[in-house]
Image (cartoon, rainbow, N blue to C red):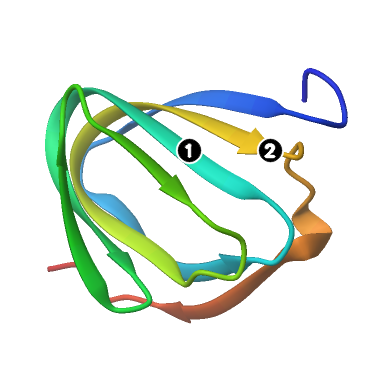
């Protein structure tokens, strides 16, 4: 983390993130730099592509698929003790 208020990470994924999870405290903001994919937020499909920004509120179930290069900004800073694993998702 930069400080307690914010952390960020640059991520490159070829297929997606196939673990559904919830973070109870932080907002996750994704800035998509390359590629395209689909996020599943509380089972709702949200298609994303390079140039898009997606902000996800705390308490939302999240997983996604796609070939993406993305910047993830987490506010307040990411703390794993507030993240809950829901289930593993079969790759599709």
Q: Name the residue under label 1.
A: 29
Q: Who's the residue at 41% across and 35% down the image? A: 30
Q: Where is residue 68 in the image (x, y as percent from the top left)?
A: 23, 33
Q: Are marks 1 and 2 in contact (CB under 8 Å)?
A: yes
Image-based side of 51 in relation to 9, left or right: left
Mark 2 surroundings within 10 Å by alpha-carbon count, few (fewer than 14), some (14 through 19), many (20 or more)? many
For residue 6, above or below residue 29: above
Image-based side of 79 in relation to 38, left or right: right
Labels 1 and 2: the sequence-earlier one: 1
Q: Which quarter of the rendered picture does the N terminus lie within?
A: top right
Q: For the residues marked 1 and 2, what is the alpha-carbon distance in whole angstroms?
A: 8 Å
Q: Position of residue 38 (x, y in %)?
A: 18, 54
Res. 19 visible in picture: no
For residue 28, above or below residue 46: above
Q: Where is residue 77 in the image (x, y as percent from the top left)?
A: 76, 36
Q: Who's the residue at 36% across and 63% down the image? A: 63
Secondary structure under tag 2 reads strand
Q: Who's the residue at 60% across and 70% down the image? A: 59
Q: Name the residue under label 2.
A: 75
Mark 1 surroundings within 10 Å by alpha-carbon count, few (fewer than 14), some (14 through 19), many (20 or more)? some
Secondary structure under tag 1 reads strand
């Amino acid at each position: 983390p930069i400080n307690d208020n914010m952390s960020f990470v640059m991520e490159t994924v070829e297929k997606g993130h196939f673990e559904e999870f919830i973070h109870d405290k932080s907002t996750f903001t994704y800035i998509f730099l390359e590629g395209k994919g689909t996020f599943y937020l509380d089972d709702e499909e949200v298609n994303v592509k390079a140039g898009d920004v997606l902000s996800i509120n705390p308490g939302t179930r999240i997983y996604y698929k796609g070939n993406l290069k993305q910047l993830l900004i987490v506010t307040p800073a990411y703390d794993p003790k507030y993240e809950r694993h829901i289930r593993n998702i079969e790759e599709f």
